[in-house]
Amino acid sequence: DVKVTQSSRYLVKRTGEKVFLECVQDMDHENMFWYRQDPGLGLRLIYFSYDVKMKEKGDIPEGYSVSREKKERFSLILESASTNQTSMYLCASSSGQGGDQPQHFGDGTRLSIL
Amino acid sequence: ILNVEQSPQSLHVQEGDSTNFTCSFPSSNFYALHWYRWETAKSPEALFVMTLNGDEKKKGRISATLNTKEGYSYLYIKGSQPEDSATYLCASMEGYNNNDMRFGAGTRLTVKP
């Protein structure tokens, strides 16, 4: 079975801290994604990676960066956390080059910035 | 940027009822339409990926149709069960690139026993 694992289910950090959210997939997928989900809004793409060391900005990349040093791992970094980054963060992966393959999601990390 | 709309926002039905909800999306440059089920405290789970106009897919009691010319997809659940309670998300892809996928806000379904 496909497995996407996010390092934490719940995380509480302080304003100004550097925050790392980790995601690992075991399916040898090329594509990995980071989304955030806020009430009343659809999932919004922060960053996407289609290969090791490759990344592309999504709709809301400001205040975030990513790292993909190995195919199975995609990290989201909040350079200097702010309260408006309090949200649910979801990681996903998929195979193939186009969008006709389903995405496989992790359980999400609920991040609170105080 | 695509605007993907889902309706209704929430829905309460009795066990045994059949139900359906809608996902509408801009039809220009359409590439694929995804449906996901997201149960509380779990990860979103893929239900269907549809690409062709007129496509109809089925998985148990759940089925979906796609109309790319008018820009909508319906998700149907026949004989709803309490375990169908979840948020159902659709996402539309405009173009070939993976970062062109846009999610709707979801339809939250509650099935009462």
Image (cartoon, coloured by chain):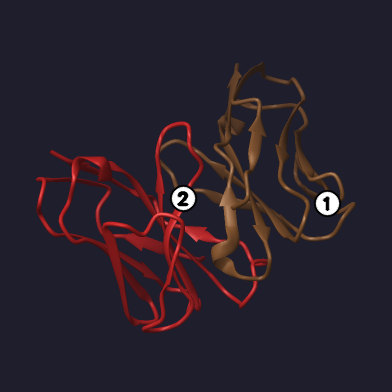
Chain colours: A red, B brown
Q: Nearest the camera: A57 or A110?
A: A57
Q: Is residue B86 above or below residue A80?
A: above
Question: Are dots 2 and 1 on a single chain?
Answer: no
Q: Position of residue A53 (x, y in %)?
A: 36, 83
Residue positioned 73% across, 48% down in the render: B26
Residue positioned 77% across, 55% down in the render: B28
The quadrant where residue B12 appears: top right
Q: Position of residue B10 (x, y in %)?
A: 59, 23
Name which residue type carries label 2.
Arg
Residue positioned 86% across, 54% down in the render: B55
Residue with the mark numbered 2:
A44
Residue with the mark numbered 1:
B68
Horizontal side of B48 relative to B84 (left or right) equals right
Q: Nearest the camera: B113 or A22?
A: A22
The quadrant where residue B17 appears: top right
Residue positioned 64% across, 43% down in the render: B4
Residues packed near mark 2 inside 10 Å, few (<14), some (14 to 19) or many (20 plus): many
Horizontal side of A111 relative to B40 (left or right) equals left
Q: Position of residue B72 (x, y in %)?
A: 78, 42
Q: Secondary structure at mark 2?
A: strand
Q: Is residue B95 above or below residue B56?
A: below
Name which residue type carries label 1.
Thr
Quarter of the image with the C terminus of chain B in it: top right
